[in-house]
Each structure stands twice: as C-alpha cells, then as structure tokens.
Image: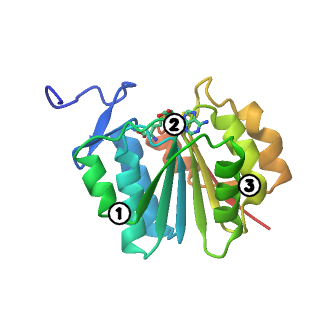
Amino acid sequence: MPRGIRTDLHGRGHYYFLGTPLQHQPNEIYLLDNFFRLYKFAKIVEIGTNRGGLSVLFGLHSWMNNGWTWTFDIHNKVGMPTKWLLKNLPVKVMIGDVFERLECEFIKERLNSVGRTLLYCDGGDKDKEFNLFAPYLKIDDIIMAHDRGTKEIPYDNIKDTVQKYNLVPIFEKEIKKLECRIFMFRKSK
Ligand SMILES: C[S@@+](CC[C@H](N)C(=O)[O-])C[C@H]1O[C@@H](n2cnc3c(N)ncnc32)[C@H](O)[C@@H]1O
C-alpha cells in the first residue's frame, strides 16, 4: 500500500495510474496519454508488464479504439486491483520470455498482421527487444522504448536499426520539454 502521495516526481521508483503501480513518471504518463489522442492503434504490444499500471493505460486506449493490448512478462507480478481492471479491459497478460521462440513468433505475427500497431519495449533488455522486433514493423507502426538516456538503452545500440528500417523520431520537442525517458519512432517508407 502507498504510504503517502508521491512527490519525488523525477525519482526512479513506482508511481500510480488509476491506483495501479507503474514505473513511469507522471510526465511520461501525461505524454503517452496525449500521444493516444493523436495516434490510434488496432494493436498494442507491451514488453515488460511488471505490476501492470502501464498496461491499464494501454488497455484503456485499446478499449476506446476497439483494439487489443498484449503485455508480456517472465513473471506474474500483477496484483489487485490491477488484475481486476485488466480483466475488464481488452488486455491479454502473457507470461513468457519474449526471446523464446513461441513468444517471439507471437509478437512478430502481431506486427505483421493488418492494423496499426504500437510496440513498447520496456522489458529486461530494451535495445535487444528494439533491434529484434523493429524489422517487422509496418509503415506507420510505432515503436517506443523506455529508459532513454540511461545505460539501459544507449542510442548507439539502436542507431543502425533506426537508420536501416527508416524509423523517424516523433515528438522529440515534447519529449525533451517534458523530460521524458522515452524513445518514439514511426516506421516510414
Ligand atoms: C522495467 S519493468 C517494466 C515496467 C512497466 N512497463 C511499468 O511501467 O510499470 C521490466 C519488466 O520486464 C520483465 N522482463 C525482463 N526480461 C523479460 C523477457 N525476456 N521477457 C518478458 N519480460 C521480461 C521483468 O520481469 C520486469 O517486470
């Protein structure tokens, strides 16, 4: 249970969205929510569910757009009330390692099939996730990765993929202004 209202807005701990815990700062939640006003998705794939608060945000946007969200984690760490919320949203919680064959094929298939897709890389190896799945994006799909600006995902580690697959950075000005730790790219022709 939270002991008080969090005020360390740029700390690295857990925050809350609709009472569900997540590892995204309020400025990042705000940015993503605004982003969804402008971009609609048939499918959202999140790598790294953790305690599921961000999956709730994704699930709400999927619900509003008749879409689906799939969220992957090697461990099931989703507690109440998040579990209940996710059950009532178009969200499938997938327990598995995204680098294993079945999970990997499942994600590639989501990216390959019809309908704009968002891939959110926030698992244990973000640059590897980014480099592995970016080649399967369709034109106008979006790929994001969390923890930008940290050693978890140095730009140098994804630079070649960005160039090779025509990934165009979006909302750079807003990301910088809001001090968000998120990479956002749109797959271009
Ligand atoms: C940084 S947390 C995700 C935070 C979450 N998106 C949020 O905002 O609350 C990373 C999660 O990725 C999971 N993870 C690590 N390696 C993974 C893998 N190979 N496949 C799936 N999940 C993985 C970890 O168990 C952990 O819960």
| Mark in the foreground, 1 or 2 | 1
Mark 3 / mark 2, whichever is N-terminal: 3
Q: Which residue is mark 2?
A: 181
Question: Which residue type carries mark 3?
Answer: Leu
Whether residue 161 is situated above or below residue 40 in the rendered picture: above
Disc 1 to disc 2, how far (Cα)? 22 Å
List the residue tagged with mark 1.
Answer: 60
Of labels 1 and 3, earlier in sequence is 1
Q: Is the CB atom of the residue marked by disc 2 within 8 angstroms of ligand 1's nearest atom? A: no
Question: How far from the left and from the top, in percent, is residue 121?
Answer: 59, 44
Identity, as a three-letter code, of the amino acid under mark 2:
Arg
Q: Is residue 55 left or right of residue 121?
A: left
**14 to the left or right of 143:** left
Instruction: Return the x and y of residue 119 as percentages of the image width and height.
Output: 59, 54
Identify the residue position indicated by label 3 in the image. Answer: 167
User: What amino acid does circle 1 point to?
Assistant: Leu
The first of marks 1 and 2 along the sequence is: 1
